[in-house]
Amino acid sequence: MKDKAIGVMGTFDSKGEEHLFLKRAIESRGFKTYAINLGTKGEAAFTPDLDIGAMVGRGKERDEAIAEVLDAAKREVVRLYRDGRIAALISAGGGSGTYLATSVMKVLPFGVPKVMVSTVASRDMSRTVGTHDITMIHSVADLLGVNSISGIILEQAAAAVCGMLQRRWEPPSGRRRVALTLFGFVTQAAEAIKGLLEGMGYEVIAFHANGTGGMAMEELAADGRFDGILDLALHELADRMMGGYCGGIGPGRLEPVPHGSIPRLVVPGGLDCAVLEFTRERVPEPYRARKVFFYDFRSAIRLSQEESIRLAGEIAEKLNRHASPVRVLIPRGGWSEADRPGGPLYDPQVSGAFTEALRRGLRSDIQVCEVDEHINEPSFARVAASMMAEMISGGKKS
C-alpha cells in the first residue's frame, strides 16, 4: 500500500500548519501523501497537490463557496481513488472543517481508511459520521497551530491512518453472506439463527436495529455486499413512529435495494413495542394506561391496535415496491422477550390485527407465513434459517 498516497485534506488557509504537520508525520513513516486544499478564505499556507479552493474561485459568499468546494472535492476524491492515486484520507478541523472533510470522506467505499481530527468530536457525531466508517479523534485543545497538546493528537492520528493501511487480515472468500438485523429483545433468536446459517456455510453479518444499524445494512446491501437479508428486527420503524430510542432512521430503511436482486426475509421482531426513555418511577402520563416493559433507563410500551395497523400499512407499501424476492415470517407466539404469554407486552389481538392488515396490504405474490412459535424459541430459528437459505438458493431446499 505504500505505493499509493494518503490524502491529507483540509482547509489549508486556516489550518495549514496542522495539515503540513500531518503530511510530514505520514511521510516520515515511509508513506506518500497527496495534499488537497479545501480552503475558501485565502491562499494555502503551503503548496497543495490539488487546490480545490482555487479551482472553484474565491471571493464568493461563504455558503456558496463551501457548496461549490464540496461538490468539486467529492468528484475529485472519487476520481483520485478510482485512479489508484489515494488509498486513505485524513483531515483536521473545527466545525466547518469537520463538516467539509467528513462529507467528502463519505464518498469513499467501506474499508478505505478515513480519519478526522476534530474540535467537535466529543459532541453528538451521529449526523456527521452517519453509518460510515469514519474514525473521529477529539483534538482536546483547539486547533490553532501545533503545540505540546495538539502535536501529540496529530502525530497519533498520522500513526493511526498509516497503521490502517497496513492491515493484514482479509475476509474469507467464497462464502455467501447474509445480513441479519437484531435488537436486544430478540437476541436469542439472532444468536440461534446465526449459528444455524453458519452451520450451512454462510457468513452472517449482524446489524443492531438501533437507528443506525438498519441503515448501515441497507447501504451495504446497495453496494452488493450480501446474498440475502434476514430482517429479523424492524423495531426501528416502531420507534420512528413513536419518537422512540432507536427511531433515528432515514427513508431508505426497508426500501428496495437499487440495481440488485437480494432476497429479503422479513420478521416483525420488536414491532410489538416502542422503546422510550423513562423508568417505572417516571412514567409519562400518556403511557400510564399502556402495557409497559421496564427495562433499564428505557422502557418499552405496547403499541395500540391503531398504531400497529398504521405500521403494517407503511411496511406493506415499502415491500410492495421490491422487485427482489420478499417473504414475511410471523411468529404467532410473540415478537420480543416481553411479548409472550404472561409477559408484560403480550397482546395477541393487536399482533393479529397487524398481521391481517399487512396481509391485506401486500401484493398477492408476497408470501406471508405464520408459525406458532415465539420469536426466541429454537424452533423458530430453524424455520427462519431454513427459509432464508431456500430463498438464497432460488427456492431449492438447503
Image (spheres, rainbow, N blue to C red):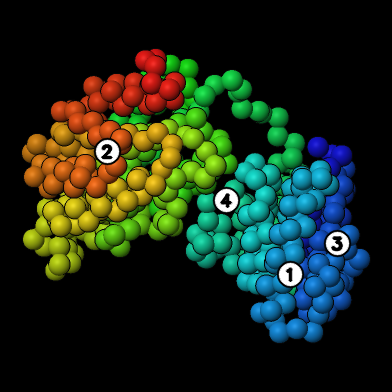
Instruction: Check the image and report above or below for 63 versus 149.
Output: below
Tell me the number on the disc at residue 193. none
Instruction: Check the image and report above or below for 383 versus 367.
Output: above
Instruction: Check the image and report above or below for 356 versus 297.
Output: above
Cα–Cα gap, marks 4 and 3: 25 Å
Cα–Cα gap, marks 2 and 3: 55 Å
Identify the amino acid type marked 3: Leu
Q: Residues within 10 Å of mark 1 (few under 14, many from 20)?
A: many
Residue 148 as seen in the image, left or right of residue 185: right
Task: Determine which residue is flagged by label 4.
Answer: 132
Viewport quadrant of the C terminus: top left
Figure disc tally: 4
Q: Nearer the viewer, residue 144 or 9?
A: 9
Residue 43 as seen in the image, left or right of residue 135: right
Residue 186 in sight in this render: no
Q: Residues within 10 Å of mark 3 (few under 14, many from 20)?
A: some
Task: Determine which residue is flagged by label 1.
Answer: 69
- Residue at the (35%, 45%) spot, across then down: 319
Mark 1 element type: helix
Pick whichever of labels 4 and 2 is earlier in the sequence. Answer: 4
Identify the amino acid type marked 1: Val
Task: Determine which residue is flagged by label 3.
Answer: 50
**Pointer 4 with pointer 2, Cβ within 8 A:** no
Q: Quadrant of residue 365?
A: top left
Pick whichever of labels 1 and 4 is earlier in the sequence. Answer: 1
Q: Nearer the viewer, residue 365 or 213?
A: 365
